[in-house]
Amino acid sequence: MSELQNRLDKLALRVDRMGMRVEQAIIDAIRAVEARDVDAGRAVRDGDTAIDREEVEIEQECIRLLALYQPAAVDLRTICTIIKVNNDLERIADLAASIGKKVKHVVNLGLDPSRFPQFNQLIQDTLDVLGRAVRMIAAQDAETARRLIEGDKKVDQVYKEFVQLVLEAEGRRPQGAEAALTMINLAKALERTCDLCTNIAEDIVFLRTGDIIRHAGAFEPPQA
Amino acid sequence: MSADATTEAKAAAFPDGMRSALPEAGKNAEPAGKRPPADPKGSGDAKGVECRCAIIRAQDFCLYYGSKAGVKNITMEIEQCAVTAIIGPSGCGKSTFLRSINRMNDLVPAARATGLLEVNGTSVYDRRVNLVNLRQQVGMVFQKPNPFPKTIYDNIAFGPRLRGLRQRARLDERVEECLRAAALWDEVKDDLKKSALALSGGQQQRLCIARALATRPKVLLMDEPCSALDPIATARIEDLIQQLKGTYTIVIVTHNMQQAARVSDYTAFFCMGDLVEYGLTRELFTRPQKRQTEDYVTGRFG
């Protein structure tokens, strides 16, 4: 096996592990909200620094491999995909940190977003989509990736319904604005997590096929 | 028109000059642009090149060295005024194919060609083809710079003189034009009477390109033109290739895949005498269609 292949395999493994860490961060953040555990929320936020460091190291290794080996074909696509997936995972970890930070507000304002079934649905969908996306990074299956992208529209719909209900319920209450904003931000973080998982799926399709399917149909893809 | 110019104009009327003794060769002269899109592999399973205007056309072309085939059943079209790179492992037939285009393989005693290989509608392996005319129209630059042991001026003027151009003023004009086109004029304009062998390797190679341009060819064949040059001289040749491609059709054989990826519009991958895959360079280096190509461009070959 060539040295490039060796280093690419190690890199893929690191991204795979990074995916698992990020998935755990989102799980921990959601649990902290559900348990109203401010310390657990803070722990998620503190854990973000390690993920940030890992993201930078993975990107540096990608740049080194590009400079040293000038890879082509599947090797080039692998490195481009790793750079993008790595970045998406880091942003998901940021969202976990942001959810963790909001646990304090949930407790202080005495909020219970789980009284809205849409919020519970969003949690379920997020955990499902994220779990699939993380497994997909290792499996690199374009078909699973395409199915995941299709599922994202449902999440968007649930999020919109939740926003509507929260605004109706909190709009008339004193201090309702702050409560609504906190809950909507929580839901937004979950919805954005699903969006980023969709990006990861699109990158996996690119890795396998070389097709850039982002914004499909919106415009004629420019020539490379 | 002077006698000089008339002689030269006659010789320059390629393919007619080359074809002058070939009354029936014109039957292939259907405008290439009107042909249906080419399937260069012939098998239909490799992504092909849809030539808008093909200048070189190979159809089941084989070249044998004795009983051994150097290249087998090559079917491809090469686009006019574009850069086409030929890549592949050592012994894959890429240089054999390149050298077939201007019949350099004729110098190999047991070499024998079958099938069709056309340049601008004329079969280059027709016995009646005038080899001097062919090689003036299909110029070649080799791996190692090989200037004549003459002055810089005489190196460039050699081809045009052979074609009957004698007028000093016109020769001066041609020498300057070619040295400028080869991005060498500014460096040598005051030393035209000095020996070409006194130039650096990179300058010698650009001189060889200028010399090839002096006969106003349609096609420039380059056989690993940078392999003996340092990175700076290599970059200058690569820049030059980009400048020349609007005017000339360039076919380049290179072992340096990054170079092929940088300079060419189309790339053909040869392996063991076969054309494995042929397509747009940007596609071939990012998502090759064939496993063999993928293995080669990612260095897994062997």
Image (cartoon, coloured by chain):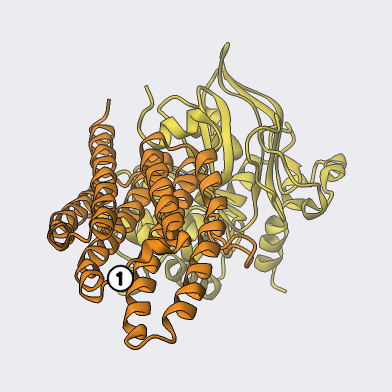
Vertical arrangement, residue A94 with respect to residue A183, above or below: above
Q: Is residue A211 left or right of residue A44?
A: right
The residue shown at (43%, 48%) is A129
Question: Which residue type carries mark 1?
Answer: Leu
Residue furthest top in the image: B67
Q: Position of residue B24 (x, y in %)?
A: 87, 40
Q: Position of residue B289 (x, y in %)?
A: 56, 36
Q: Position of residue A208 (x, y in %)?
A: 48, 40
Judging from the image, mark 1 belongs to the subunit labelled A
Residue nearer the viewer, A24 or B287? A24
The residue where tag 1 is placed is A111
Residue nearer the viewer, B55 or B209? B55
Q: Is residue A85 left or right of residue B251?
A: left
Other residues around mark 1 within 10 Å, as few (<14) / some (14–19) / many (≥20): some
Q: Is residue A167 visible?
A: yes
Dividing the image into 4 quarters, which one contains the N terminus of chain A?
A: top left
Vertical arrangement, residue B137 with respect to residue B268, above or below: below
Q: Is residue A67 left or right of residue A45?
A: right
The residue shown at (31%, 58%) is A92
The residue shown at (50%, 51%) is B282
Q: Is residue B147 visible?
A: no
Q: Is residue A44 left or right of residue A121?
A: left
* Quadrant housing residue B28: top right
| Image chain in yellow | B
Which color was chain A given? Answer: orange
Residue nearer the viewer, A194 or B231? A194
